[in-house]
Image (spheres, rainbow, N blue to C red):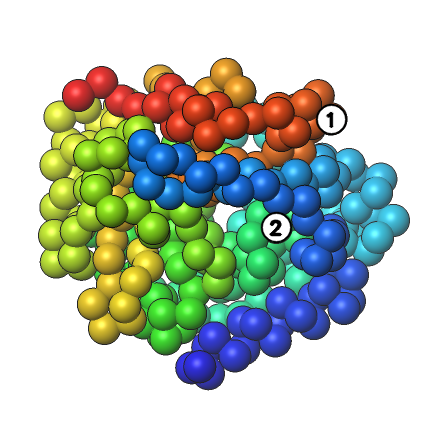
Amino acid sequence: MTNLATTLESTWRLQEDEGFLLSDPSGVEERTLPDPDVGIGWRLRWMPHRELRANTVELERRGILNPDRRHEILIRDPRDPSGRHCFLCKENITECNPRERLIPLHLAGRDYLAGANFAWIERNHFTVMAAEHVDQDFTSHIIDAMVDLYRQSGGSFRVMYNGPQAGATIPWHLHYQITTERFPVEDLGDDSRYPTMLWRVDTAEASAMASDWIGPDPEHRRVNVLIAGEVDRPTVYVFARDRRRSRAKSKGLMGGFEICGDLIYSEPDTRVIFDTATFETARKAIAEVRPED
């Protein structure tokens, strides 16, 4: 294990012990639904702790959110219609979440910070955010930074990029999601059997593949990207997305975790879906956000 991977995993355990994480990973309910047509097992997870993300009183009670934060000094992006401060700017994290332990990184020539996601989806789930406030839009730097991060972790941490309105709910600050957990899509044998548009390519082809998809319609076209596989020759999974098809009836917003085969349920009224879903339910959810060819 590399020094970075060791640092990340030990920081995750420390943040868990300190109560910064909203729940204990050992208590997650999980269902795996083998799909004979696609050839993988869809994974469903029940994670009610994620509903606490918007519960300011509870976050303050737990010490995750600073009750004495100074709202007037927080950095806000003028394009955010909600007027919220940017959750990924270091200055805001220092003021609002002083217990979050940030790990400095240097990826493909730029500075980044990694912080444990307190409303985590996967074990060892970190958000890796650019040190400067720059947009989430796809550029050639994205793949270079993802590959650099993957290799620095020794292949221990899968790296995911969500395009704006395709899973990234903070489109004005560049960031990635990383985790040590394997995604269902990694067991796929034939790309054509996957219910949405997917290209598995090597690192040399990935940026051009994503750009070729986005280029003809940059207003609507997006990508989700996952890097996994052998550390010396990682596989890049490029998922074609369209911001006009970002939600599924049985799931709601479909981000990178969902598009890779992990369907996360947390709202009380979705418990019945978690309990009764079949592999057809999971497959249909992904198919519903498939862009038009």
* Of 61 and 184, the residue lying toward us: 184
**Which residue is outermost to the front?**
36
User: Dividing the image into 4 quarters, which one contains the C terminus?
Assistant: top left
| Residue at 33 percent of width and 59 percent of height | 228
For mark 2, does the 10 Å Cα neighbourhood hold few (<14), some (14 to 19), or many (20 or more) residues?
many
In what element is the residue under mark 1?
A: helix
| Residue at 33 percent of width and 41 percent of height | 39
| Residue at 53 percent of width and 58 percent of height | 126
| Residue at 49 percent of width and 58 percent of height | 181
Q: Position of residue 62 (x, y in %)?
A: 84, 53
Give the amino acid type for the residue marked by disc 1 in the picture. Answer: Pro
Horizontal placement of 152 versus 124: left or right?
left
Q: Which residue is mark 2?
A: 120
Corner quadrant of residue 212: top left
Horizontal placement of 249 versus 223: left or right?
right
Q: Is residue 233 above or below residue 50?
A: below
